[in-house]
Amino acid sequence: MSPLQIKPGIYWVGGIDWNLRYFHGYVTPRGTTYNAYLIIDDKITLVDTVKHYLFDEMLDRIKEIIDPARIDYVISNHVELDHSGGLPRIMEVAPNARLVTSPQGKKGLQRYYKRDNWSFMVVKSGEELNIGARTLKFVHVPMVHWPDSMVTYIPEEKLLLPNDAFGQHIASAERFDDEIGWDIVHEEASTYYANIVLPYGDNVLKALDVVGQLEIDTIAPSHGIIWRSYIDKILPVYRRWASNETKPQALIVYDTMWDSTKKIAIALRSGLEEAGVPVTVRFLQTSHISEIMTDLLVSKAILIGSPTLNNGMLPTVSAFLTYIKGLRPQKRLGFAFGSYGWGGQGAREVAAAMQEMGMEMPLDTINIKYLPDDQELESVKDAGRKLGELITNIE
Ligand SMILES: Cc1cc2nc3c(=O)[nH]c(=O)nc-3n(C[C@H](O)[C@H](O)[C@H](O)COP(=O)(O)O)c2cc1C
C-alpha cells in the first residue's frame, strides 16, 4: 500500500500490523496500525514512527515521496516502543534531522535507546515550531498515556496528531473513519479506551478542554483509522468515558469448577432482568479480561463470582481483579458471589478486593455451600432484583 495523502502535502506513511493479536495484555482481533505522518514543507517533518519490525514498510512509503535523508525534524510524541521503535534507523537514514520531544520524552528515549549522537530539540507545552507554511504546536498531555505523552497540532490544517488518544486497534486497507463505519470504529475505540486510557480520566478531561479550544477537522491518531467524519461523535463519547459516566446496566463476570457459581450467576441475571436492567454475562474461561473491560466501560454495576479453591478465589478471577484494579473504573456498584465447600474464602476475597477498589457494595455477599437449591436460588434472584432496582434508581 502506497503512502496516503491525508491533507495536501501531509502523508500517512505508517505500518499495518495485520497479524497482531495481543498487545500488552489486551487481545486485538482486528490487528493494528502504527501511524506515522510525513509533512512536506520548507522543513520536512516526520511525526512519530512505527514498531521496529515495520520500519522498512514505513521507509518504503517515505521513499515514494522524498529522499528520507532530507527529513529535518522527527517528532516523537510518545516514547513507547510501538511509536519510537523506528527512531534508531530513521535517525541514521536522516542524519541531519533534529528529534523533537517533551522533556520526559527525551529522558525516556535516552533510557531506551542510549544514542549520544541524536540532536534533541526539547519543547515546552504550548511551544510552536514553524516549518514553512505550517506551524507545529506541541501540547504536553502527561499520562495520556505515559508521563512523556505529547500531542502535535497544526492550526493551518486544522489537524490534530494526538498519538495514542483517540486510537483504536484496527488493521485495514482503509485509513478514514467513514470508510469503516461508526459501529466498528466506536467498538474498537471503546476497547482501546477501556484497556489503555481508563485510569487517566482526569488527564483526558483536561486534554479535552484544550482540544475543545482548537479548530479541528481531522484527528490523526497513532493507531487505527483517522477521524474526519465522526469527530463530533467521538469527542462527547470520550468525555463520558473520562467522566466514568455509565448506563443503567449490569455486567456479571464469573468462573466455576462444577457450575454452582454459574447457577448463582444465572439467578442473579434473572433478578436483574426482572428489574428491567440489561445484563451481560461473561465466563472467564471463554472471554478475555480485556474484552470484559469493554463491557465494564459502560456498565453501572459489576457482579463478580468465584468458587473457593484451596482457601482462596480462582486464579482467573484474581487475575481479572488485578487487571481492573489497575484500570481504576470509578463510580461503579459492586457485588460478590460464589460457592464453597467448607471455608468459603473465595467470594469473601472477591468482595474485599472490590471494596478496596472503592466500589460501592450495597448488598451482602452471597456465598452458598456446594450446589444452591431452589430456595437459595430464589433468594439469589431477589438479591439480583434489589440490585437492579438500585441501578435503575441511580441518577
Ligand atoms: C480442588 C478443589 C479445592 C477446593 N478447595 C476448597 C477450599 O479450600 N475451601 C472451600 O471452602 N471449598 C473448596 N472446594 C470446594 C468448592 O469450593 C465447592 O465444590 C464449590 O461448590 C465449587 O463451586 P463451583 O461449582 O462453582 O466450582 C474445593 C474444590 C476443589 C475441586
Image (cartoon, rainbow, N blue to C red):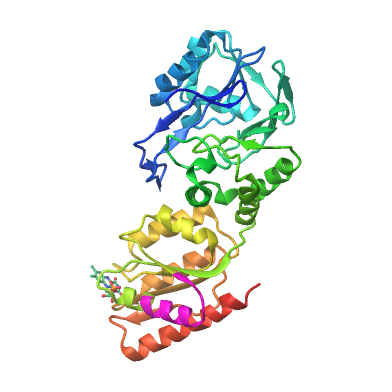
Horizontal side of residue 177 vs 370, given as left or right = right
> Does residue 99 show up magenta in the picture?
no
Q: Position of residue 245 (x, y in %)?
A: 62, 61
Classify 246 as above or below 31. Answer: below
Q: Is residue 334 visible?
A: yes
**Measured along the vertical axis of the image, is residue 324 above or below residue 84?**
below
Q: Position of residue 199 (x, y in %)?
A: 57, 51
Q: Residue 247 lies in what quarter of the image?
A: bottom right
Is 354 placed above or below 59 here?
below
Q: Quadrant for ligand 1?
A: bottom left
Magenta span: 266-279
Residue 273 on the magenta segment: yes
**Is residue 343 at least partly visible in the picture?**
no
Residue at 46 percent across and 78 percent down: it is: 273
- Which x, y percent locates residue 343? 33, 76
Q: Nearer the viewer, residue 193 or 330?
A: 193
- Counting from the top left corner in percent of width and height, residue 58 is at 45, 22
